[in-house]
Image: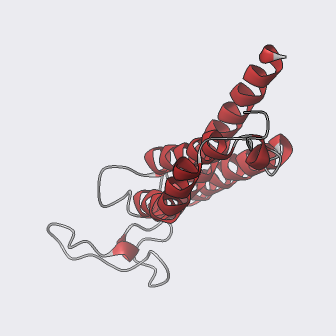
Amino acid sequence: MKGKTEGMSVIVKTVACILTVPAYIFGLYIVIRGHLTPGGGFAGGAILATLIAMLLVSFGRNLERGFRKESLSVLEILGMSLFITLAFFGLSFTFFHNILANSGGLFGMSVEFGPNSGYLNTGGLIPVMNIAVGIEVFSALSMIILLMLTGMKEEKK
């Protein structure tokens, strides 16, 4: 047992590697399509943080060294700052005006009256704000998971 590598068994590591790309794509899908379907920034960020938890549990200290609490903190501040900046842009024109809606650019396609047909670029500023919330939630939950993991290892010593 002493010669065993850090982390779980080879099978768990292999399954974690196989699930990494689909989980990452699913998390991004939930974040970006949050204005059309249930979900959004918080749910997608939580899914992406769960991916980090799965990798940290599977690979142990080998992967823990790659994550820095400082970089996650900077990413969290970036997400919060982006969200607040976008909110102030909405407040500066009129009260909660969606400045990108019907602008013709990215996320600005006009929508006809009636149910939304599912076009991704019809949300205006909402998808961009979902991305900001997803960045913040992902980094905050990943930092909590990382701190809990390092705290457990210090307690064992």
Q: Is 130 in front, or is 61?
A: 61
Q: Is 140 in front, or is 120?
A: 140
Residue drawn at (72%, 33%) of the image? 1
Residue drawn at (74%, 49%) of the image? 63
Q: Residue 70 lies in what quarter of the image?
A: top right
**Where residue 93 appears, x then y in whole percent?**
56, 61
Q: Residue 58 lies in what quarter of the image?
A: top right
Whether residue 98 appears in this view of the structure is: no
Residue drawn at (67%, 45%) of the image? 139
Task: Give the color scheme: rainbow, by chain, secondary structure or one colour.
Answer: secondary structure
Residue 104 is left or right of residue 142, and the answer is: left
**Where residue 109 appears, x then y in whole percent?**
37, 80
Residue 113 is left or right of residue 65, and the answer is: left
Residue 100 vertical position relative to residue 46 in the rendered view, above or below: below
Screen quadrant of the C terminus: top right
Q: Is 42 in front, or is 80?
A: 42
Residue 55 is left or right of residue 26, and the answer is: right
Number of marks: 0
Residue 9 vertical position relative to residue 16 in the rendered view, above or below: above
Residue drawn at (61%, 59%) of the image? 89
Residue 44 vertical position relative to residue 110 in the rendered view, above or below: above
Whether residue 37 appears in this view of the structure is: yes
**Where residue 46 appears, x then y in whole percent?**
51, 43
Q: Residue furthest bottom?
A: 104
**Where residue 18 appears, x then y in whole percent?**
49, 62
